Image (spheres, rainbow, N blue to C red):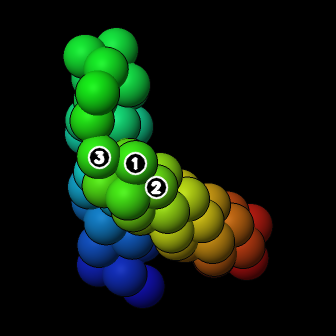
Amino acid sequence: MCRVKTFLVILIALLMAGTLVVLFAGLFGMVRGGGDPHRSNALMRWRVILQAAALLLFALLMTLLKS
C-alpha cells in the first residue's frame, strides 16, 4: 500500500506541475497579445483537465491515508 501512496503523490505532483506549465503558457499568450484564440482555448481546456485529474487523485490519496 505504501508504494501506491508514493506513486499517487508523485503523479499528483506531476499533474500540478503540468497544470502550472499550461496555465503560464496560456497567460503568456494572453499577455503577448495577438495570439491564436483557438490555441488559448485549448490550453485552458487542458488546464482544467489536468487540474481536475490532480484533484481527483488528491481526493483518492486522502481517502487512502484516512484508512
In the rendered image, which quarter is residue 9 located in?
A: bottom left
Please name the amino acid that badge 1 sits on.
Pro
Residue in view at x 40 percent, y 48 percent: 37
Q: Residue 55, position in %: x, y?
A: 62, 61
The residue labelled by disc 1 is: 37
The residue labelled by disc 2 is: 41
The residue labelled by disc 3 is: 36
Residue in view at x 37 percent, y 81 percent: 4
Taking depth in this image into account, of 33 and 13 the one nearest to the observer is 33
Task: Tell me, yes or no, whether the two marked residues, 1 and 3, touch with CB atoms within 8 Å.
Answer: yes
Q: How far separated are the C-alphas under marks 3 and 2? A: 9 Å
Q: Residue 42, position in %: x, y?
A: 39, 62
Task: Tell me, yes or no, whether the two marked residues, 2 and 1, touch with CB atoms within 8 Å.
Answer: yes
Per the image, label 3 sits on a secondary structure element best described as loop
Please name the amino acid that badge 3 sits on.
Asp
Per the image, label 2 sits on a secondary structure element best described as helix
Taking depth in this image into account, of 21 and 10 the one nearest to the observer is 21
Q: How far separated are the C-alphas under marks 1 and 3? A: 4 Å
Q: Residue 30, position in %: x, y?
A: 38, 25
Per the image, label 1 sits on a secondary structure element best described as helix
In the rendered image, the vertical position of residue 45 relative to residue 34, given as above or below:
below
Residue in view at x 25 percent, y 16 percent: 32
Circle 2: is it few (<14), some (14-19), or many (20+) Cα within 10 Å? Answer: few
Indicate which label's residue lies in the foreground, 3 or 2: 3
